[in-house]
Amino acid sequence: MAARHAITLSSRVQRLPPNPFAPLVPLMKDPANIVLAQGVPPMELFPLAAMSVTLADGTAVSLSASDVQSAQRYPPFAWGPLLSWCRRHTAEVHRPPHATETGGGAGWDVAVAAGSMSSVEMAIALLLEPANDQGKGDWLLVEEFSFTASLDCLASVGARTLGVPMDRHGIDPAALRQMLVDCQRAVAAAAHADAAPPSLPGAGPGTGKVPASLDRMPKALYTIPVKQPSSL
């Protein structure tokens, strides 16, 4: 989620060409069209015809034949309802700046990935520059007790991390605010681009800490990066 300041994407991402499949998606959704470049197997070869599961509380959930068929295709053909739910959930629980009640807003959106670490790796590729010839990469503010797999990903691109103090709810907002101020002063005083404005990842799993309270996170943490040229 971008703050109100302009976010600079990594040079790697800026070099990526436009997605050539984007204009083809509407044609690919129509079974009457045959797009040879789509790489999608014929629907009659899909192995699943119906699906029904029983939850722990005894609730039975059944998917229609059309939903099961769509679920076996590439995500853009079936993830519309999931994306809508994620947008509404993000707007309601996390309340990012400019969020609307319907789950949309200017300057932010959600994306679906294959897993948590896949998401972290994509965010790193999107926002961080790899280490330069001197082995120095971008600076990143992280929780002082962070998920080790996330730290490994950061180390693989040469990112340098600073731990933000935590309390029983997670990141200490006052400490985060002061560290961001100190970082911006360091950037302003630097004669080179070595100290880049920091990015702040969310809490990773496996730290054993108490999750940040849903009441404090939006009110305290989200308001801080909005006032600083950072990414959250």
Image: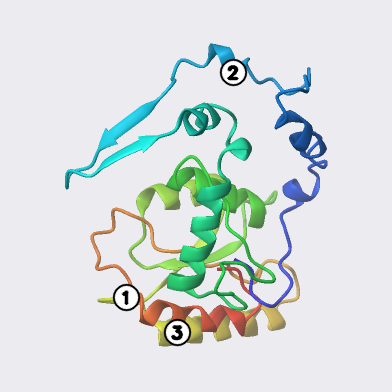
Q: Position of residue 151 (x, y in %)?
A: 43, 52
Give the residue at x 59% y 18%.
43
Give the residue at x 70% y 32%.
29
In the shown orientation, is residue 33 left or right of residue 89? right
Asked where in the image residue 163 lies, by quadrant, the reply is: bottom left
Task: Single out the residue that lies furthest toward the top.
Answer: 45
**In this rendering, which labeled residue sits more in front, label 1 or label 2?**
2
The amino acid marked with disc number 3 is Lys
Under circle 2, the secondary element is helix
In the shown orientation, is residue 57 left or right of residue 167? left
**In this rendering, which labeled residue sits more in front, label 2 or label 3?**
2
User: Which quarter of the image is occupied by the C terminus?
Assistant: bottom right
Binning the other alpha carbons within 10 Å of mark 2 as few (below 14), some (14 to 19) or many (20 upward) gives: few
The answer to whether mark 3 and mark 1 are in CB contact below 8 A is: no
Task: Single out the residue that lies furthest toward the left.
Answer: 57
User: Which quarter of the image is occupied by the N terminus?
Assistant: bottom right
Q: Can the viewer see residue 158? A: no
The amino acid marked with disc number 2 is Met
In the shown orientation, is residue 33 left or right of residue 128? right
Residue hosting label 1: 213
The amino acid marked with disc number 1 is Ser
Residue hosting label 2: 43
Under circle 1, the secondary element is loop
The answer to whether mark 1 and mark 2 are in CB contact below 8 A is: no
Residue situated in front as seen by the camera: 25 or 228: 25
Give the residue at x 54% y 46%.
121
Residue 219 is tagged as: 3
